Amino acid sequence: MILSELKFQWFNLASKYSEDDILINTLWNNISVNYSKKNRHYHNLSHINSMLLQAKENQSKFDDFEAINFAIWYHDIICKSTKKDNEEKSAIYAKKCLKSLNFEEKRTKIIQNLIISTKRHEVILNKNLDNSYLLDFDLSILGTKWESYLIYIQNIRKEYKIYPNFMYKPGRKKVLLYFLEREHLYFTEEYRFKFESQARMNIKKEIELL
């Protein structure tokens, strides 16, 4: 169900920029294959679906809604637990695909920056709230109920199963402390109100479990 719905959404978006159904389908297949790899326990199509739903709910608040959607589709297209340049490679991948759709170069650069901003979850583009919302969508899982958060951290651990606990736990703790030490986890008022308190409680609880 989710796969067919996502395919429909992709075709609806991409067909605004190309009439080549074979190309659009090829791009879709590449998206589907990448996000469905066996190591994708969290950074998969369910994650993309969640972000797309949030984007749709906040559509009126964006300066460039379609750019946000493309950024969501491609922000985790490259995701290897052994690499530290996934976001940069995802941005390059997105550029190549968007070029094939005859997407504007200026907007493509914006999408690349949006993708790269997810590396450290820091706003790069501040002329509007598009970047802020994208990052908030990406981290919304942190502010969910503990039961959902627990499933999330279990899936993240599976993605990094190549690393033994003595390597994984310090690295994970460093990431969590980075978020805790920030003044705000979320960049928009709505998401701070909705998720900030719960997210901080979840993170502290996870640190205690490490």
Image (cartoon, helix red, strand yellow):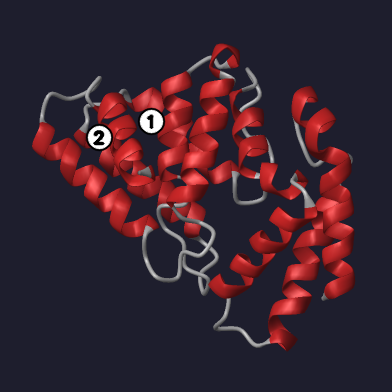
Quarter of the image that includes the N terminus: top left
Q: Residue at x 82, y 76 (%)?
A: 210
Give residue 99's mark. Answer: 2
Residue 181 coordinates in the image, percent (x, y): 89, 51
Q: Secondary structure at mark 2?
A: helix
Q: Amino acid at mark 1?
A: Thr
The answer to whether residue 181 is visible is no
Q: Is residue 32 left or right of residue 203?
A: left
Residue 73 coordinates in the image, percent (x, y): 41, 41
Where 169 falls versus 47 (above or below)?
A: below
Q: Is residue 13 left or right of residue 110?
A: left
Name, please, the residue furthest toward the front: 1
Residue 196 coordinates in the image, percent (x, y): 84, 39
The answer to whether residue 2 is visible is yes
| Location of residue 172 (image quadrant) | bottom right
N-terminal label among 1 and 2: 2
Where 192 falls versus 122 (above or below)?
A: above
Where 102 falls versus 63 (above or below)?
A: below
Q: Is residue 207 left or right of residue 58?
A: right
Q: Secondary structure at mark 1?
A: helix
Q: Residue at x 20, y 36 (%)?
A: 100
Can you identify the residue that label 1 sits on? 108
